[in-house]
Image (cartoon, grey):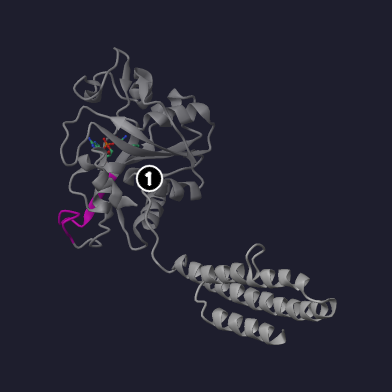
C-alpha cells in the first residue's frame, strides 16, 4: 500500500510542477482533495475495505499525504495570488511626477487685479475703502462739488441723466461728499468705482470706466502732503525709481488743482511707445479740497484742510498690460480675459 501512496505523492508533485496559473492551481486542488471527486477523497473511501490493522496504517499514511498536499496547494495558491496582486498594483500605478490636468477655473478681471493692488497700497497707508452710489442727485454730482450751475459738465451732452435731477455719476469725487458726511475728520479714504460719461468710445475712451478717488482731511495738511502721498504710491506701484510731476490744472472742487504725471514705467523717462515718446504718463487729477466743499459738509476750512485725487484705472490697465485699446476690457471675450490668470 505504501507503494501506492508513494505513487500518488509522485503524481501530485509532477502535476503541481506543471501548474502555471491561479485557475490551474484551483483545478489541481479540486482534482486531489475536492470533497466529492478528489483523488485522495476517493482513496480514503477505500479504507473501509481493508482489515482493521491495514486501515489504521494506510489511514495514517493517507492523512499524512493529504497534509503534505494541502500545504503544497496553499503554497502554490499564495504564490499565484501574490503575483496577481503585484500585477494589479503595477497596472494601477500612478506617476505622480506627471503634470496635472488643468480644470477650467475662473479668475479675476484685470481691472479688479489692478484695483486690488491700489487698494492694498493705500490701506497700508491707513486709508479706509469707501463705496458710494452710482446714481446720484444733482447735489452730490455737482452742487456739493462746487460745480457752478453753468458748468459744461452739467450738460446733457456730458452726463447720463435718468430724470431731471438724477444722473449716473461721472466721477468718483461724489464719494468725497458721502465720506465727509459719514465720518468726522481726521479721515483718509479711497473710493474705487464705476463712473459714466457720454464719451464716444475709442481706444482711450469708454462711456463706462473705473476711477479710484482718494481723500484725506486732517489739521495742517498741505500740498506737500499730497505730493508725498502720490510719490509714495507711484514708487510702490511702479518701483522706487519712479518720479512724479504736478501740472497746474482746474477742477472746481479743489484749489489749487493739478494733473499728476509719473515717469514711464516702461522706459524710465527716456521716451518709448508706451509714453508716446514723452517719458511721462498721465495718472489723473488732484488738488487741495476747496474750502467751499468742506463748508458744504459742515467742516470748518480754517480748522481742517485736505487733499483729494482721482485716478483712471482703464488707461492705466491698458498701459500696464500692453493693450492698445481699452474697449477690449469690456468685450468679455474669453480668449482675451484668459490671459490675465
Ligand atoms: C476727474 O474725473 C476728477 N474727478 C479727478 C480729481 C479727483 C481731480 C480729485 C481733483 C481731485 P478727469 O476728468 O481728468 O478727472 O478724469 C480722471 C481720469 O479718468 C483720467 O485721467 C483718465 O484716466 C480717466 N478717464 C476720463 N475719461 C475717460 C473715458 N471716457 N474712458 C476711460 N477713462 C477715462
Q: Work out whether residue 319 or residue 144 is closer to the camera in this orientation and state it.
A: 319
Q: Position of residue 298 (x, y in %)?
A: 49, 24
Magenta highlight: main SS = loop
Task: State which region is magenta.
Answer: 271-283
Q: Residue at x 37, y 35 (%)?
A: 193
Residue 55 is left or right of residue 268, and the answer is right
Q: Position of residue 313 (x, y in %)?
A: 31, 43
Q: Work out whether residue 278 or residue 46 is closer to the camera in this orientation and state it.
A: 46
10 Å neighbourhood of mark 1: few (<14), some, or many (≥20)? few
Q: Position of residue 261 (x, y in %)?
A: 27, 50
Residue on which the image places disc 1: 106
In which quadrant is the N terminus drawn?
A: bottom right
Residue 259, visible in the rendered structure: no
Q: Which residue is at the far top?
A: 164
Residue 330 is left or right of residue 86, and the answer is left
Is disc 1 placed on a helix, strand or loop? loop
Q: Position of residue 16 (x, y in %)?
A: 57, 79
Residue 245 is left or right of residue 92, and the answer is left
Residue 302, visible in the rendered structure: yes
Q: Is residue 139 above or below residue 315?
A: above
Q: Residue at x 72, y 86 (%)?
A: 2
Amino acid at each position: 500500500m505504501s507503494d501506492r501512496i508513494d505513487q500518488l505523492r509522485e503524481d501530485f508533485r509532477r502535476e503541481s510542477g506543471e501548474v502555471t496559473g491561479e485557475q490551474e492551481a484551483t483545478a489541481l486542488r479540486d482534482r486531489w482533495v475536492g470533497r466529492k471527486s478528489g483523488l485522495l477523497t476517493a482513496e480514503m473511501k477505500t479504507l473501509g475495505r481493508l482489515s482493521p490493522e491495514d486501515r489504521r496504517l494506510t489511514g495514517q499514511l493517507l492523512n499524512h499525504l493529504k497534509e503534505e498536499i494541502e500545504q503544497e496547494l496553499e503554497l502554490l495558491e499564495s504564490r499565484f495570488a501574490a503575483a496577481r496582486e503585484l500585477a494589479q498594483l503595477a497596472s494601477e500605478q500612478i506617476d505622480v511626477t506627471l503634470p496635472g490636468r488643468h480644470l477650467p477655473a475662473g479668475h479675476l478681471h484685470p481691472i479688479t487685479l489692478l484695483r486690488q493692488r491700489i487698494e492694498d497700497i493705500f490701506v497700508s497707508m491707513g486709508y479706509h475703502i469707501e463705496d458710494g452710489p452710482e446714481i446720484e442727485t444733482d447735489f452730490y454730482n455737482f452742487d456739493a462739488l462746487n460745480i457752478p450751475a453753468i458748468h459744461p459738465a452739467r450738460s446733457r451732452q456730458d452726463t447720463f441723466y435718468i430724470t431731471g435731477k438724477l444722473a449716473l455719476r461721472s466721477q468718483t469725487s461724489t464719494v468725497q461728499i458721502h465720506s465727509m458726511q459719514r465720518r468726522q475728520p481726521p479721515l483718509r479714504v479711497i473710493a474705487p468705482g464705476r463712473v459714466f460719461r457720454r464719451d464716444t468710445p475709442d481706444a482711450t475712451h469708454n462711456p463706462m470706466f473705473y476711477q479710484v478717488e482718494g481723500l484725506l482731511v486732517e489739521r495742517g495738511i498741505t500740498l506737500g502732503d499730497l505730493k508725498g502721498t502720490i510719490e509714495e504710491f507711484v514708487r510702490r506701484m511702479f518701483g522706487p525709481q519712479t518720479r512724479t510731476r504736478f501740472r497746474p490744472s482746474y477742477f472746481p472742487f479743489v484749489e489749487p488743482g493739478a494733473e499728476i504725471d509719473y515717469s514711464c514705467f516702461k522706459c524710465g523717462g527716456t521716451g518709448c511707445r508706451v509714453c508716446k515718446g514723452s517719458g511721462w504718463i498721465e495718472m489723473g487729477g488732484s488738488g487741495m479740497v476747496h474750502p467751499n466743499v468742506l463748508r458744504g459738509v459742515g467742516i470748518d476750512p480754517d480748522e481742517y484742510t485736505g487733499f483729494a485725487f482721482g485716478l483712471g484705472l482703464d488707461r492705466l490697465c491698458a498701459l500696464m498690460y500692453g493693450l492698445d485699446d481699452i474697449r477690449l476690457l469690456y468685450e468679455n471675450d474669453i480668449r482675451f480675459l484668459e490671459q490675465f490668470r
